[in-house]
Image (cartoon, rainbow, N blue to C red):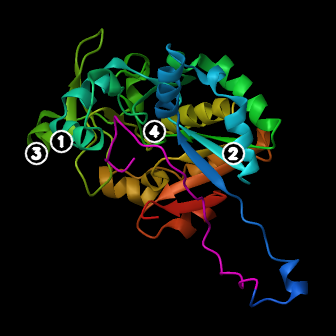
Amino acid sequence: MSGQNRGLQQTGSHPAPRRVKRPKAPSEAPAAELRLLPRYRSLYQINTRVWLTELSSTLGRRATLDDIPDAELDRLAAAGYDWVWLLSVWRTGIAGQRVSRTHREWRREFEETLPDLREEDIGGSGFAITGYAVHPDLGGDEALARLRERLRARSLRLMLDFVPNHTALDHAWVEDHLEYFISGTELDLTRAPQNYAWVERRQGRVLLAHGRDPHFPGWPDTLQLDYSNPATQQAMIDELLKISGQCDGVRCDMAMLVLPEIFERTWTRRPQPFWPRATAAVRAKHPGFTFMAEVYWDLEWTMLQQGFDYAYDKRL
């Protein structure tokens, strides 16, 4: 989540590299050495909502994951990809959509990206998640399970998103587990109004922090999770365990934000390490599960030491 195109995102391919020594080019390496060169895994990123919107215009009705043609999956397999990363399949809410439609800077960017922009094109950010269940408009969890089987039949593995740092404004935990979030005071709101918001609950409104990194204002369609609370960490591990039964790997959005030193720099409270526990818990249940970290600030190696298989810098 770079802060760009949060409510209206684009389709494209995306590599998942590790920091490795460059192998010799074929013209540089002898035949015996060529046989030993590793084959690097390749991943194709698809903005799921954009893809299904395009299919909908062809079908004349709302398309779901079940409508993705086998021919498209055949094409990806024939191109030599190992992974398909379906961006933004999870449930999102009205609150996030409202923010995306009314935020002036985002709206201007949407209009530059899509000159014939319509209100219905702005669905809200796929990173403002209300729950790790497939959005009903995409066909729900059952449709994802059927698509995964079709991918498997073509030796394609499925990667989905995991957003560790924050939730949507209207996540159920706001009502049921307020202790999972970082709260604010009137003084916090006065000092940094861009980083806090009043959120309505049945028991009355509360002041909560927006999700953010230490260098930029908060993302106004999100709420910051409190990783210094062990119960929050366990709740997120439970979410990962659920997700791991639905795919073969996860791309973890801005994964470095919950590192103890980064979290402390942002929120002046230091949590216990999260990723070593989380990756171990998932692999105990699914030994071959893959973790890929989006990471900034030259922390790729740090993330690999935390249990990730791959790490990439968004500058790629």
Q: Secondary structure at mark 4?
A: loop
Residue beneath label 3, please?
191
Residue beneath label 4, please?
229
Q: Are marks 1 and 3 in contact (CB under 8 Å)?
A: no
Instruction: Point out the tag, 1 or 3, that comes first from the N-terminus.
Output: 1
Q: Is residue 236 left or right of residue 200?
A: right
Q: Which amino acid type is marked by label 4?
A: Asn
Residue 314: which quarter of the image? Answer: bottom left
Q: Which residues are magenta?
A: 1-26
**Disc sitting over residue 76 in the figure:** 2
Instruction: Point out the tag, 2 or 1, that comes first from the N-terminus.
Output: 2
Q: Tell me the mark number nearer the camera, choosing from 4 and 1.
A: 1
Residue beneath label 1, please?
105
Question: What is the C-alpha distance between the residues marked 2 and 3?
Answer: 50 Å
Q: Which amino acid type is marked by label 1?
A: Glu
Q: Is residue 183 left or right of residue 43?
A: left
Q: Are marks 2 and 1 in contact (CB under 8 Å)?
A: no
Q: Residue 177, image x and y in percent?
A: 43, 22
Q: Residue 286, image x and y in percent?
A: 78, 40
The residue most toward the left is 190
Q: In front: 171, or 182?
A: 171
Q: Tell me the mark number nearer the camera, choosing from 1 and 3.
A: 1
Question: What is the C-alpha distance between the residues marked 2 and 4?
Answer: 42 Å
Q: Residue 116, image x and y in percent?
A: 26, 32
Question: What is the C-alpha distance between the residues marked 1 and 3?
Answer: 22 Å
